[in-house]
Image (spheres, rainbow, N blue to C red):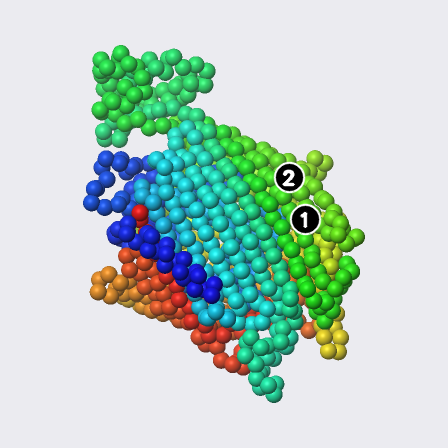
Amino acid sequence: MKKKHLLGLLLALICTAAPAQRSLKGGALTLRPDGQTPGGHFDQGWESDSVRKEGVPQDIRFWRIEPRFGSVRPAEADTLAHGFPNTVLTDGMRGEYNFTGNYGAPRQPRLYMMRDVEAFGSQFVFESPYDFFLFQPGNLLFTNTKSPFTNLTYHSCGNKTNGEDRITALFAVNAGKPLGVGFRIDYLYGRGYYDSQSTSQFGGTLFGSWRSDHYEMHAYYNANHLKTTENGGVEDDRYITHPEAFAQGYSPADLPTRLTKTWNRLYVNTFYLTQRFNLGFDRYRDAEGRLAARPAAAESSARRTSGLGKLLLGLSRDTLSAETDSLPAVRQSDSLAVAGSAEAVAEEPQLTCEFVPVTSVVHTLRLEHSSRRLLCNKLADDYFADYYLPGDSANDFTKNIRLVNTLALELREGFNRWMKTGIRLFAGHEFNNFRLPAPVRGREELYTTNDFFVGASLLKEQGRVFHYNVTGELRTSGTDWGEFNVEGKADVNLPLGLDTLRVEAAAFVRNETPPFYFMHYHGRNAWWDDEGLSKVFRTRAGGMLRYGSTRLSAYVETIQNYAYLRETVQASEDRMRYGVAVSQSARNIQVVSATLGQDFRFGILHWDSEVTWQATSDKDILPLPALNVYSNLYLKFRIARVLDTEIGADVRYFTRYYAPAYAPVVGLFAVQATEAPRVKLGNYPVVNAYVNFHLKRTRFYLMGSHVNFKKGAGAPFLVPHYPLNRLVVHMGISWNFWN
């Protein structure tokens, strides 16, 4: 019934938008590398009088922001046709994640260099396994469009008993040139092919931006509710690997599982605001784009300014003097002489005025209100190893309120010929409040932390050849200045042959306190308090080389005082009972990783591949597969000159290793326990076959996932005791509408 309601809602939205549709030339919304859409530039092409009368203007641009300081980063729209079937898969676009089998289930990167990229991130670690659904401020696409834009996307498989569905809706509109607003709705429902495995996730986002010369603002509010039914995995892996060992045959839904009547629920709500105040000056260019002398009317107007205005005027004179001495003086018209106003200057026919920012004052606010609840309505003494609270059911609740304020002063690069580097100074405060169950049932314990931080950055983002960004940050709780982060990245772009050789380098040195919930966690079946954990010291260095369709990257990291979750097991003759605890290694751990990606094309035949090699110095504490492989072989062609078509299959594979286990009691992944025989996973390819289409503004596909499944052949697990779904047929469709 829910599926019918979803389809009905989708059809209603389509019918509402259909009368105003227009064809989108060039197919999907794709941005060029310089950040432009096929129809316009960031700051141009918005003249309402020049819009053709016979159709709706179809010009939209997307961008992301740097989360801490709100700097704009041009981005591509999520409307590319290639790879569309993989966007629905929980294990990632190239199968880089382990997950517990169902759609939208908890997951963890199998590639180490994809983990813990952000320094001093959220303390609410329970949200990390759901990054498939949740997103950070730097991942949200902001929009600016000439006409209201709508995108509807729907993925589905299975039936009303075991099927999986996801529907997303994006709407964006502009109220004038500088103000863009919109909303995004995302609903995911995976019923699950195995017992007690369903997931239900709902998220809604309101976002807006204002971009003008002197003031920029980006804001959004995001609310999410995620519900995961926990089954603890199947009771015996042989139900999957050796079904012939049992006299009775089982369908996936009938397989005995270790848990029932158990749920994890997350509420993750975020309000984010970043605003930038720009101070600068105007400069002028002639019809050929050359810098020109300031008109006399502007000079007379500038003389009436004082303080900072005179300083900026002096800076503009320094910038222009060397480049405009050879240009003829600009003749002042009578109207300009009389008015002496900015409006009159703008009427000068030979010149174009542009604003040059010199200094920016940046303020960023981030407020997060998150909570987690574990419900277990059954006395599961045949699963849990530890009990710390009385009662025949669990209702563990924890809440985190996080408030971060950052204030920055930035001297912008490029405002004159000597300023080749931007300089940014920043300071801020982070407040966290945590609520945990107390030893006395029904009571709560409160924890509060306050951290102050200061830092600075040197950056170069302009130009085509060389860019860099180096940031240093120091944090204190008022008594301890031990936390710090120094990170940097740089890239060089060199034209070579018919393409550009891009070389990237990145490194960081960090000293961080383990997350709060690694030091304090209270629940019926897991409990620890340990503020004696040492700070985790990490260094990473590496880079990437990219040329055409070839990519090569390599990184090395050293970790001291590595903190991690480990599974605990109490084994008996007929049952193993599970718990979880926190440990910290006193040894240094080294991780080395290298990735080679290569895309081949022979006419209509395409072959895209990526291979990652990893090595870890301690496989018991930080287990990683030695090889991770993704390969996609497909035919790409056009039918009747309008229907872009891809037919192919891809494969995901990794070598055997002791993959991390999933601990339902905390909803996180943990190293397998050594008290009982451990499980090695891997050496099992997963093959998906698909046909993918793109027609003007519509993308649609049909895909069979895990087409190589054969009952009793191999071990189709990514997480111990959690089998993958068998052969499942997926379908999906996405529309773009212009109103």
x and y percentages locating residue 176 in the rendered image: 34, 35
Residue furthest toward the bottom?
A: 247
Please identify the quarter of the rendering in which residue 325 is found: top left
Does residue 583 appear left or right of residue 735 in this picture?
Answer: right
From this viewpoint, is residue 501 visible? no
Q: What residue is at 44 percent from the left and 40 percent from the top? A: 208
Please identify the quarter of the rendering in which residue 681 is found: bottom right
Please identify the quarter of the rendering in which residue 228 is found: bottom right
Does residue 132 appear left or right of residue 281 in this picture?
Answer: right
- CB within 8 Å, label 2 to label 1: no
Residue to which mark 2 is pinned: 431
Does residue 444 appear left or right of residue 362 in this picture?
Answer: right
Q: Is residue 561 above or below residue 241?
A: above
Q: CA distance from mark 2 to mark 1?
A: 13 Å
Residue to which mark 1 is pinned: 516
Disc 2 residue crowd, few under 14, some 14–19, many 20+, Cα 10 Å: some
Q: Amino acid at mark 1?
A: Phe
Disc 1 residue crowd, few under 14, some 14–19, many 20+, Cα 10 Å: some
Q: Secondary structure at mark 2?
A: strand
Q: Is residue 729 above or below residue 185?
A: below
Q: What residue is at 42 percent from the left and 18 percent from the top? A: 309
Q: What residue is at 54 percent from the left and 81 percent from the top? A: 712
- The earlier-in-sequence mark between 2 and 1 is 2
Q: Is residue 250 above or below residue 224?
A: below
From this viewpoint, is residue 284 visible? yes
Q: What residue is at 23 percent from the left and 29 percent from the top? A: 287
